Structures are given as C-alpha cells and as structure tokens.
C-alpha cells in the first residue's frame, strides 16, 4: 500500500499550472455518448476517476484513446446500455451516465452508485427529474432499469436542492427530449457552464447555464466536438492552501480567478496578499495566518464544500478561532481525526466544527478516508514540525494529477513510498 511521507515547515515558493477540472471532465466525457461521433477533449487531468470513466465508455462500446491530457472518444459504436456494479463502484459520480444513456438509447440499467465516505449521496433528485422527462424507473433490488419507450419530452423541473449532478443529468437527457425543458433552482457551478458549452458545441441549444434557471431546447441530434476543459478550481484552492500554511509565495497559471471568489476572500481574511490578473493568481502568505471567523459551505458561488477540509488545515495553525459549518455533506469532517493527531485543537458538534488555532502542529501517522480529506492532511503536514506519514494515497489520485511532483516543484519535501 502506498504512503506519503511529508517533511513539514518548508516554505512553498514558485509557479505552477493548474490541472483541468475533474468535476467538469467527468460529465463532459459521459455526455460524449450523446454525440454518436468523435469528440476531442483537451486539458483532461489524468486521474483515477477519469480512467474509471474511460473504462465505462469502453465497456459501453465507445472507442476511446488517450494522448497525454487529450481524450478522443468516438461513441458511434455504442452497443450497450448497462453499467455493471464493478464499474459503477469504481467512481461515485458514474450516475452521470444515466441521463446520457437514456438520451442516446432510450434506456439504461445500472446499480445504485451507493454512498461514499463523505455522505449517503442519495440520487432522489436525479430520479425524480428524469421521471419528469418521461423516464420510467424500476428499482429491482438496487438495480435501476430505466426506459423511455414513449420517448422523452420537455418538462419544467424545479430542483429541491441545486444538485450539481442532477442539473447535469437533466441537461444531458433533455437534449434528446421533445420540446423545451426548464430547470429552476439549478446548480450554478462553473462545471455546469463548461458542460453546457461542450453540449452547445455538439449542436445542443442550452441557455442560462451558470444561473438558477436553465433552458434546454430538445430533440437535437448531436455531433462530436472539440473542447478544452476549464481549470480545476478545487485543485487551485488546494495549492493555495498548501502555500498559505507554509508561509510561502505562489503563482498559479491557467486558472480562472473568478471561479475561486469565495475561497480567495477567506484566504485574504487569513492575511494572505492575493493579486489576480488574466489567468493567473499570485499569493503571498504571512509567517502566521489569522483564523477566518466563520466558514460556511454553500452551493456556488458560496464557499465550496470541497475546500472546507483544506481551509480547516490552514485554520488549524492560525491565530484565533474559526467556526466551520458544513451545509452540504453530512459526513465531511473525517479529516479532523488526522488533524487532531497532529496537535490541532478542534471540537465538532453535528455539522459545526470549532477550530482553535495552535502555534505548532507536529508530524504523525495519519490515514485519509476521502479525496479532499487526503489533501487536507497533506496541507496540514506541510505546516507541521517533523515528518507526517499519510495512508490512503489512492484517494488523492482520484482528484489530483501528479500531486507530489507539483508540490515538490514548489519546494516541498514529499515522497510516495510503498509500505
Ligand atoms: C458534485 O457532487 C461534485 N462531484 C462534488 O465534488 C461536490 O462536492 C458537489 O458537487 C457539491 O458541489 C462531481 O462533480 C463529480 P450534489 P454531486 O448533487 O453532484 C444532496 C469532490 O471532492 N443530494 O450537488 O454528487 C447530496 O446528498 C466531489 O470533487 C440529494 O439529496 O453533489 C448533498 O448533500 C465531492 N439528492 C447535496 O445534495 C440527490 O439526488 C449536494 O449534492 C442529489 C444530491
């Protein structure tokens, strides 16, 4: 099993490019099923979640080739509509294939993707929304048999929660529906805009992406397209957090600063000097940070839940007390176990965590149990005295491309060992 060994208290300095967005490339790759031809997707991060998505596309009969960070997918040979449990379980967000398969084949069969380490991850909003489009769904002991024998038809869909995945599934499926679909209370994340841009390049007619109301004109025959995935705003926030906790200075290139508004605001509250221009962010961190007063996670453009673990690590060694409220996922504080082992002072009650900043963190043996939790432990380790040994590296590989080498290029002492 792999383990990361991090030697702390080294200042990070330098410049690095931000990877392509995991949460954008996954739905875009799934939606290539709709095109019935060849699509070329650039700036794809090489992650285990991307490889899991490619495995599903190939299992369904698509021809997929990977050239560096470019994925070429030809879905003309699509021959299946069933995704086996083994592939579904490789990646939680494989539910995004549901809308694409139904839109292309009028049917789909897959198992409930199941929860993950950060929560139960229900899909009720997905299923209810697809039923509004005319999909009949039978739950056969956890195997969903979906069909749209009478075709798909546009609908007005009001989401009870601005679910990112459900918004994406509806957008994709509605491209094949007869008539107009209107989504209200839609998710507004940048990844929604990126997916809509790709689908429109393929011949779809989607407007309003990025706002709470999205309109999809259906019954479009889609074709392949060439697209470059947006930068990963969470990977960018991760690198900024690693730099902040080490008192360093970093320049991020190929990033969209406006996608990180809420995160940059918190880092400035912590005392970081941040300048952003064009596709760059420059951040200078102080020797010791101030704790942010309150960090509450919200749907975009609010503070993103995916960066809560990272800013918590930054807050752990700050001056003052930070109050965290995790409003999105019910079990997203597991990284706190590792932070406590490193000397952090954190109290948790339900979805609230109170972080009392300490002057020193010390290295320890810790275990990651989810993707952003793993990044949180690396962040804290960079600000801790001595060596930290982190198990659960596989979680990092789900969402970060070449994570250790990127941090090493900025001056970190971090190695992956087999143990
Ligand atoms: C996407 O997950 C991201 N994943 C997550 O990133 C991110 O944390 C999340 O959006 C919120 O921004 C991808 O894009 C692949 P949701 P998703 O549907 O679509 C509840 C990471 O670390 N809900 O917006 O699954 C749900 O339980 C990952 O990169 C229902 O109740 O998120 C949660 O409480 C983690 N019923 C909330 O909505 C549903 O049918 C947000 O879920 C769907 C969701």
Image (spheres, grey):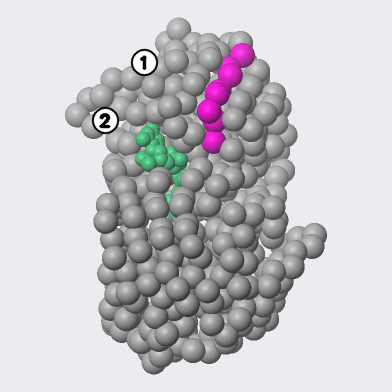
Q: Residue furthest top?
A: 150
Q: Residue at x 62, y 78 (%)?
A: 285
Q: Which residues are magenta?
A: 180-187
Q: Residue at x 47, y 58 (%)?
A: 294
**Tag count:** 2
Q: Residue furthest left?
A: 141
**Predominant secondary structure in magenta?**
strand
Q: Against 15, is 151 above or below?
A: above
Q: Quadrant of ligand 1?
A: top left
Q: Would you say the beta carbon of the disc 1 residue lies within 8 angstroms of ligand 1?
A: no
> Would you say residue 410 sits in the magenta stretch?
no
Query: Can you say which quadrant of the picture contains the C terminus?
Result: bottom left
Q: Residue at x 30, y 27 (%)?
A: 144
Q: Which residue is mark 1?
A: 136
Q: Are marks 2 and 1 in contact (CB under 8 Å)?
A: no
Q: Residues within 10 Å of mark 2 (few under 14, many from 20)?
A: some
Q: Position of residue 41 (x, y in %)?
A: 65, 48
Q: Could one spot residue 59 in this view of the protein?
A: no
Q: Residue furthest bottom?
A: 386
Residue 143 badge: 2
Query: Can you say which quadrant of the picture contains the N terminus?
Result: bottom left
Marks 2 and 1, how far apart in space?
Answer: 13 Å
Q: Residues within 10 Å of mark 1 (few under 14, many from 20)?
A: some
Q: Would you say the beta carbon of the disc 2 residue lies within 8 angstroms of ligand 1?
A: no
Disc 2 element: strand
Q: Is residue 191 left or right of residue 138?
A: right
Q: Is residue 43 left or right of residue 97?
A: right
Q: Position of residue 238 (x, y in %)?
A: 53, 66
């Amino acid at each position: 099993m792999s383990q990361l060994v991090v030697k702390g208290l080294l200042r990070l300095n330098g410049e690095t490019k931000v990877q392509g967005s995991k949460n954008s490339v996954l739905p875009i790759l799934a939606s290539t099923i709709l095109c019935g031809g060849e699509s070329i997707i650039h700036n794809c991060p090489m992650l285990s979640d991307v490889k899991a998505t490619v495995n599903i596309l190939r299992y369904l009969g698509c021809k997929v080739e990977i050239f560096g960070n470019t994925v070429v997918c030809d879905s003309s040979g699509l021959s299946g509509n069933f995704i086996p449990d083994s592939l579904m379980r490789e990646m939680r967000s494989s539910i995004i294939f549901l809308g694409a398969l139904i839109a292309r084949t009028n049917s789909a069969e897959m198992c409930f993707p199941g929860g993950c380490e950060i929560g139960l991850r229900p899909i009720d909003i997905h299923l209810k929304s697809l039923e509004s489009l005319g999909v009949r769904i039978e739950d056969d002991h956890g195997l969903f048999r979906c069909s749209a024998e009478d075709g798909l038809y546009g609908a007005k869909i009001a989401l009870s929660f601005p679910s990112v995945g459900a918004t994406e599934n509806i957008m994709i499926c509605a491209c094949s529906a007869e008539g107009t679909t209107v989504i209200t209370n839609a998710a507004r994340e940048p990844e929604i805009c990126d997916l809509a841009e790709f689908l429109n390049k393929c011949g779809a007619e989607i407007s309003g992406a990025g706002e709470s109301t999205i309109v999809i004109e259906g019954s479009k025959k889609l074709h392949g397209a060439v697209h470059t995935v947006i930068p990963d705003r969470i990977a960018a926030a991760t690198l900024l957090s690693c730099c902040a906790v080490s008192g360093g200075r970093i320049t991020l290139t190929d990033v969209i600063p406006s996608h990180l508004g809420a995160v940059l605001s918190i880092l400035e509250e912590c005392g970081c000097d941040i300048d952003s221009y064009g596709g760059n962010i420059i951040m200078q961190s102080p020797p010791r940070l101030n704790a942010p007063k309150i960090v509450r996670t919200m749907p975009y453009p609010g503070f993103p839940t995916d960066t809560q673990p990272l800013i918590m690590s930054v807050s752990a060694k700050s001056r003052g007390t930070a109050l965290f409220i995790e409003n999105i996922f019910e079990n997203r504080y597991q990284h706190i176990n590792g932070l406590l082992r490193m000397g952090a002072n954190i109290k948790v009650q339900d979805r609230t965590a109170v972080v009392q900043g300490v002057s020193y963190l010390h290295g320890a043996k810790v275990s990651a149990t989810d993707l952003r939790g793993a990044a949180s432990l690396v962040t804290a380790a960079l600000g801790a005295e001595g060596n930290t040994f982190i198990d659960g590296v596989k979680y990092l590989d789900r969402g970060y491309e070449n994570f250790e080498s990127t941090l090493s290029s900025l001056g970190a002492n971090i190695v992956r060992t087999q143990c």
